[in-house]
Image (tube, rainbow, N blue to C red):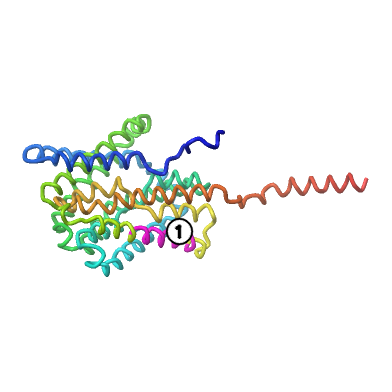
Amino acid sequence: MKRLRRPRRMPIDPYILLLLATVGVAALFPARGTVADVASGASTAAIALLFFLYGARLSTREALDGLRHWRLHVTVLACTFVAFPLLGLAARGLVPVILTHPLYQGLLFLTLVPSTVQSSIAFTSMARGNVPAAICAGSFSSLVGIIATPLLAASLLGGSGGGFSADSLLKIVLQLLVPFLAGQLLRRWIGGFVTRHKKVLALVDRGSILLVVYTAFSQGMVQGIWHQVSPLRLGALLVVEAVILAVMLLLTWYGGKALGFTREDRITLQFAGSKKSLAAGLPMASVLFGAHASLAVLPLMLFHQMQLMVCAVIAKRRSHDPRPEVTAPEPAAASRTAVGTGTRSG
């Protein structure tokens, strides 16, 4: 009877439902005029707070300890900021027959976003992978992404991506990097508080992202951007994203085998190297794309839910793989055999 119960881990992230509900609220009640100005200012402050908390959370000591797995971390970074963008550039051939240019911009931006931290750790742990390496890999990716994502966006998207310029990069530095560094500097004094109240601060994180989503999609509704997207185009976008995810999952798993990584490290590589962070991508898109952020973040929101559902299935299957460490009990087994043979001979 217990097997008939609903599984404890649902494939649909409840937070995604909150994000979709926020999009619905923005569609029905978009912020206009003074309310839009207030929402925009609050969104800017929320993004700065978000990255300040990221900096306060990241343990510098843990990051330095993780450097001993440098080959794995470099491979994760290569998947995140090299292989993914190459797939995004290859998708340019789908414009305009399959994807519209604004949707393609969002898809390309998706490939430039850093990897996740929390879900990569959770799936790595479920699949019995290298959890400490997953923590470091996700942290390194987030840290590198603060610089790499806007630089890659400026070079690959150019002026068509919402006005990338030196001013855009300056906004990234002031709104994302400076708060992050401030959090790192103050971690000595506030790190304990952040650790003790991480559940409360997680609500602040998620609330900030919901505010960013509401502001971005409100701007899209006011400007009538959604008239450019049809259900057929959205369906095509989902298919393209499914292909990209499948390629990255295969590349990270079999590429890790070719590079000689252990099973545990290959699991870490697969989950950290094939995923994209919604929490980091949404604030960056808000800064980089401005009024055009609504369409820019749509591919990322869809990909985020897709990767959670697919990786949950993979992690559960990996958790049932036979443990390669079964060779460890051999001495005990051997001694048991020796005793058995001894009794037989006696």
Please name the residue shown 45% across and 56% down the image.
Answer: 72
Tell how many labels.
1
- Is 219 above or below relative to 237? above
> In x, y percent, where is residue 282?
25, 47
In front of the other: 276 or 72? 276
257 horizontally vs 103: left or right:
right
90 horizontally vs 254: left or right:
left
Q: Residue furthest bottom?
A: 93
Image quadrant where residue 237 sits: bottom left
Q: Is residue 243 magenta?
A: yes
In front of the other: 146 or 125? 125
Q: Which residues are magenta?
A: 241-255
At label 1, counting other C-alpha atoms closer than 10 Å, the crowd grade (few under 14, some 14-19, many 20 or more) is few
Quarter of the picture holding the N terminus: top right
| Pointer 1 residue | 71
Q: Is residue 25 magenta?
A: no
> In x, y percent, where is residue 80?
36, 58
Main secondary-structure element of the magenta-colored stretch: helix
> In x, y percent, where is residue 161?
18, 59
Three-letter amino acid code at disc 1? Arg
